[in-house]
Image: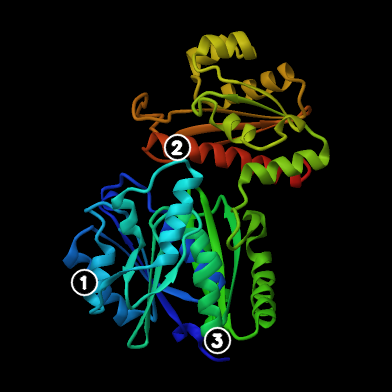
Amino acid sequence: MKDFRNKMKAEIICIGDELLIGQVINTNAAKMGVLLNLAGIRVVHSAVVQDEWNSIVQAFDHARERADVILITGGLGPTKDDITKIVLCSYFNSELILNQDVMADVHELFERRGRIVSEINKKQAEVPACCRVIRNKNGTAPGMWIEHEGKIFVSMPGVPFEMLPMMEDDVLPLLKKQFDLPSIFHYTILTHGIGESVLSELIESWELQLASKNIRLAYLPSNGSVRLRLSAYGENETELQRLVMHEAKAVLPLIEKYVFGVEEYGKEQPRIETVLANELVSRKKKLALAESCTGGYIAHLITSIPGSSAFFNGAVVPYHNEFKHALLEVDNSIFNTVGAVSEECVRQMAKGVLKKFSSDYSIAVSGIAGPAGATPEKPVGLVWIAWANKTEVKTEQFIFGKDRVRNIQLTANMALNRLRQLIEDGF
């Protein structure tokens, strides 16, 4: 099989001080990366640079050494701080000229909004003479396609609402028409409850033989989950899918108990709560929650799912011990002996909330999210979780970390995923 990793390469350059200081989140690079990969174009580098002449020029110089296509966003507004167009003119020894088609687009947009075109807005119709204009259906700044010494530079607006349609409707079709692009196929297996290093050891022998088949594996860890992405490049998309799916099927027996779903590249990643919801709906079962350390976060995840009333009966957030007793009938003696963060407490919380909401399953959590509240015996990150049905209760202790928000997220993900596993095992 040929190695297609040296085929067409792209670099993304996002221009804007607001991106560098974190005032605006750079979603453009992520969305462009997905679109380029789906088109068979490999992104080899992504950069964010300030609205400053030398910085932009240096970014252009470095990009042309690495990539065949350089995609630029930002710096195309009508104000003085937006300098991308004049930098492009200087870089390619060109000049700004008035484009009548763009001028017509600007007038039409302003008329549609009931506004008058000012002199500064008219400057949006000025483009480098060396460029091919890409008209903007959603704004005033046009895109600009420049070919120079075998490289393609495409400059687009930084506003995602304007940039994305330009990428999808104009830039990518032009690239596909001009070049014989390979196919790229990604398949991602979603796991939870196993660390990245342990997972790597578990599948080591399988992973080692992937290189001979030109399949690349990436580990993508996040909040108790690890995504395993298999990627392949080639001429025949059907053959790529066959090869990758064969390897995915081969690794599943090694990690099956940790797998909670698969991700279709370019689409929204399946969430643990959604997978559990589908399981509950298919079995016509109801869920109830008792949350202490997570403060209702698990209920938030559940109720963010459309139609959650089909499987979710309700939740109690008894943050103080007196309400654990009053609302869920937890024995007061527990608080004076083993404490609220204990197996005994979550066991009674799970039974109490199951009864209160007449449910089939319940989850109860109690822990020390931090940063305060720890003791030598009970450190920050200690969490007890219980899962109950109408006949039994299962419990487990976890020690996560010292970050409060992450502890809450890890607790929620673990609680939901473990219930999913228990139900699949006949709980």
Cβ–Cβ below 8 Å for labels 3 and 1?
no
Quarter of the image for the C terminus: give it.
Answer: top right
Q: Which residue is mark 1?
A: 58
The one of 294 and 233 positioned closer to us in this rendering: 233
Q: Nearer the viewer, residue 233 or 32?
A: 32
Between residues 318 and 158, which one lies in front from this camera angle? 158
Judge depth for marks 1 and 2 and give the one in front: 1
In the rendered structure, which amino acid carries the disc numbered 1? Gln
Quadrant hosting residue 244: bottom right
List x then y, in percent, for residue 209: 56, 81
Q: Residue at x 78, y 28 (%)?
A: 391
- According to the image, label 3 marks what residue? 180
Residue 391 relative to residue 43: left or right: right
Q: Amino acid at mark 3?
A: Asp
Q: Disc number at residue 407?
A: 2
Q: Is residue 150 visible?
A: yes
Q: Circle 2 sits in a helix, a strand or a loop, which is it? A: helix
The answer to whether residue 377 is above or below residue 276 is: above
Whether residue 201 can be seen here: no
Earlier sequence position, callout 3 versus callout 2: 3
Q: Which residue, as the protein is rendered here, is positioned at the far bottom?
A: 2
- Horizontally, is 397 left or right of 251 in the view? left
Q: Which mark is residue 168?
A: none
Left-right relation of 394 to 320: right
